[in-house]
Amino acid sequence: MSQAEHKAGAPQSVRCFIVTVSDTRTEATDSSGRAIAELLTAAGHQVAGRRIVKDDPDLVRSTVEHQLTSMSAQAIILTGGTGLTSRDSTYEVVIGLLQKRLDGFGELFRMLSFEQIGPAAMMSRACAGLAAGHIVVSLPGSEGAVRLAMERLIIPELGHLVQQAAK
């Protein structure tokens, strides 16, 4: 079976929930969350909702867990909180919730990021995987990183990821 045949049954439109993890962003300043929403919509996907939460592990976990049980979204995309500072907790929360990790996502993202920003790409803790039948993707907080991941990795495979998660 060719790659095209394999993807033929994938949904063309996926319902996504966007979580911005930040102690400082507001609706007016959340350029990364806005970029995710715009790119998803332009690609024919649906934004089931958006939320900004403080970079607090309990808040991030409860927000993601609520989406995992609500069934309003097939994919949850987080932005922010993936760095190395003492306040960055998104990676630990997401990894703790994943039942299956997509290690290749983080590896590919860092490779693509390296082409743009050099060795600082190693500090990215972007990750993705499957939790409770949902695709969960955690991206850095910068708009440039979000656009890179969305355009080069997530949008081209989102329907296929959801299709495989449903099997």
Image: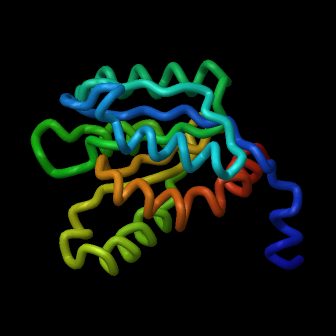
Q: How many labels does the image show?
A: 0
Foreground residue among 25 and 161: 25
Type of colouring: rainbow
The residue that appears at 26% across and 41% down in the rendered structure is 81
Q: Is residue 104 above or below residue 85?
A: below
Q: What x and y, as percent, mark residue 157?
A: 65, 60
Q: What x and y, as percent, mark residue 74?
A: 66, 36
Q: In this view, does 152 lie above or below 61?
A: below
Q: What x and y, as percent, mark residue 124?
A: 27, 60
On the picture, is 69 further left or further right than 62?
Answer: right
On the picture, is 5 further left or further right than 147?
Answer: right
Q: What x and y, as percent, mark residue 55?
A: 24, 30
Instruction: Specify the quadrant that holds the N terminus.
Output: bottom right
Q: In this view, does 58 lie above or below 147?
A: above
The residue that appears at 29% across and 52% down in the rendered structure is 142
Foreground residue among 133 and 13: 13
Q: Is residue 88 above or below residue 64?
A: below
The residue that appears at 64% across and 49% down in the rendered structure is 42
Give the residue at the far front of this rendering. Answer: 28
The residue that appears at 44% across and 39% down in the rendered structure is 34
